[in-house]
């Protein structure tokens, strides 16, 4: 009998997570400077009010990055003090958003790509909420050996429940 | 910025090229700091090359996806809406690389009074090597049609539209 050791993960859903802070103007400033998009709809009241959004918004994909460390929580950089070889990803849960890790013998992670559907941008003062689930977890056998494919579907909304976007990210473990 | 309409979008020729960089370690570090991603392969050269055996610190894939989103917004205009996008990473970019984004419309369809424009989207480096490739569907108003609704509402008439592989 062939067992499917990863079946337990399929459809598993994490509890909704709420961003630590509402969207602030200075966060947008820093963000759009980092992505090098100078569009004034992200910072000018005049441009934003004349746009379809009628208010300052973040770039459409911003909510994926809205879940930064909350005040008063452990410092992830402590891991580098404790272990000079630590890679700095401790405490970084910006893909699984609360899902338990898939336990497997595969060690090397590759990003297999994303499929994203957008409905609405996050507006100034709004707080993002994300709910993640394992849409698929399965082993494939290719020419280079076995791969573990993990598809995480993350649904982002406002606290009022208005849909922002759905991000399906494929992770490939070798 | 004059609005673009569905009728203005040509098929099978680049709609827009965006150039970012050359990406210095400072550009990469600025993104890591903005999103608070402390993975050392993005800012610690000694760790990236010594521990992870990479050629240099890496440009974040998470940054590159925003370039694709901006590309579609700027190619179809602010009054359009990027509805769907799919992309895969094919090559790493490292410090010193330039990222050139390009969108090309490959199909157009009028549905329910709105224009749906399917585009190939790609990121290349300064040597024309593709690092990221995919497809996207943007929704844009017809010249004599209604505005694209915001928030965008997916109706049964177009919910099943396929993104090309």
Image: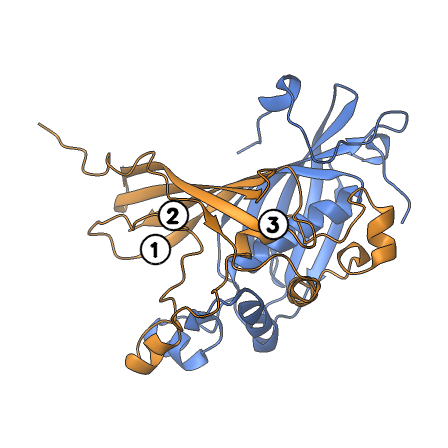
Chain colours: A orange, B blue
A135 lies left or right of A120: left
Q: How many marks?
A: 3
Q: CB of mark 1 within 8 Å of CB of mark 2?
A: yes
Q: Where is mark 2, residue-wise?
A: A171
Mark 1 or 2 closer to N-term?
1
Task: Give the class, few, some or many, for how many residues have Cα within 10 Å of label 3's Cα (few <14, many ≥20).
Answer: many
Determine which of the numbered discs, if any, sits on residue A61 in the image: 3
Q: Residue at x 14, y 32 (%)?
A: A3
Tell us which disc is closer to us: 3 or 1.
3
**Cα gap from disc 3 to disc 2, whole angstroms:** 19 Å
Tell us which disc is closer to us: 3 or 2.
3
Front residue of this view, candidates B102 and B71? B71
Q: Residue at x 35, y 67 (%)?
A: A90
Q: Of helix, strand and loop, which one carries label 3?
A: loop
**Cα gap from disc 3 to disc 1, whole angstroms:** 23 Å
Task: Give the class, few, some or many, for how many residues have Cα within 10 Å of label 1's Cα (few <14, many ≥20).
Answer: few
Discs 1, 2: same chain: yes
Q: Residue at x 77, y 25 (%)?
A: B114
Front residue of this view, candidates A52 and B157? A52
Q: Residue at x 82, y 52 (%)?
A: A48
Q: Of helix, strand and loop, which one carries label 2?
A: strand
**Cα gap from disc 1 to disc 2, whole angstroms:** 7 Å
Q: Position of residue A8 (x, y in %)?
A: 24, 36
Q: Position of residue A117 (x, y in %)?
A: 58, 37
Front residue of this view, candidates A65 and B67? A65
Q: CB of mark 3 within 8 Å of CB of mark 2?
A: no
Protein chain holding label 3: A
Q: In the rendered image of this protein, does residue A74 appear above or below residue B155? A: below
Q: Where is mark 1, residue-wise?
A: A109
In the rendered image, the quadrant that contains the N terminus of chain A is top left
Protein chain holding label 1: A
């Amino acid at each position: 009998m062939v067992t499917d050791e990863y079946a337990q993960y399929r459809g598993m859903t994490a509890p909704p997570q709420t961003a630590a802070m509402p969207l602030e103007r200075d966060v947008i400033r820093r963000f759009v400077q980092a992505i090098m998009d100078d569009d004034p709809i992200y910072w000018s009241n005049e441009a934003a009010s004349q746009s379809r959004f009628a208010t300052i918004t973040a770039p459409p994909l911003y909510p994926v990055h809205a879940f930064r460390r909350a005040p008063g929580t452990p410092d992830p950089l402590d891991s580098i003090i404790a272990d000079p070889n630590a890679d700095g990803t401790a405490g970084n849960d910006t893909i699984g958003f609360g899902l338990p890790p898939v336990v497997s013998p595969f060690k090397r992670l590759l990003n297999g790509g994303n499929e994203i559907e957008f409905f609405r941008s996050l507006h100034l003062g709004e707080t993002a909420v994300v709910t993640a689930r394992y849409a698929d977890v399965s082993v494939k056998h290719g020419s280079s050996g076995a791969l573990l494919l993990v598809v995480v579907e993350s649904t982002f909304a406002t606290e009022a429940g208005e849909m922002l976007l759905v991000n399906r990210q494929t992770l490939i473990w070798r | 910025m004059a609005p673009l309409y569905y009728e203005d979008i040509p098929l099978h020729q680049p709609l827009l090229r965006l150039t970012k960089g050359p990406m210095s370690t400072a550009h990469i570090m600025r993104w890591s700091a903005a999103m608070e991603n402390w993975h050392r392969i993005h800012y610690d050269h000694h760790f990236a090359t010594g521990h992870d055996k990479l050629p240099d610190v890496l440009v974040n894939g998470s940054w590159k996806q925003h370039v694709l989103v901006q590309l579609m917004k700027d190619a179809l205009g602010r009054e359009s809406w990027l509805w769907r996008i799919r992309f895969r990473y094919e090559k790493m970019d490292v410090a010193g690389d330039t990222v050139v984004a390009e969108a090309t419309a490959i199909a157009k369809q009028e549905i329910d009074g709105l224009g749906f424009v399917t585009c190939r989207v790609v990121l290349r480096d300064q040597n024309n090597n593709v690092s990221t490739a995919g497809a996207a569907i943007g929704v844009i108003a017809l010249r004599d049609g209604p505005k694209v609704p915001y928030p965008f509402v997916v109706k049964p008439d177009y919910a099943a539209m396929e993104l090309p592989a």
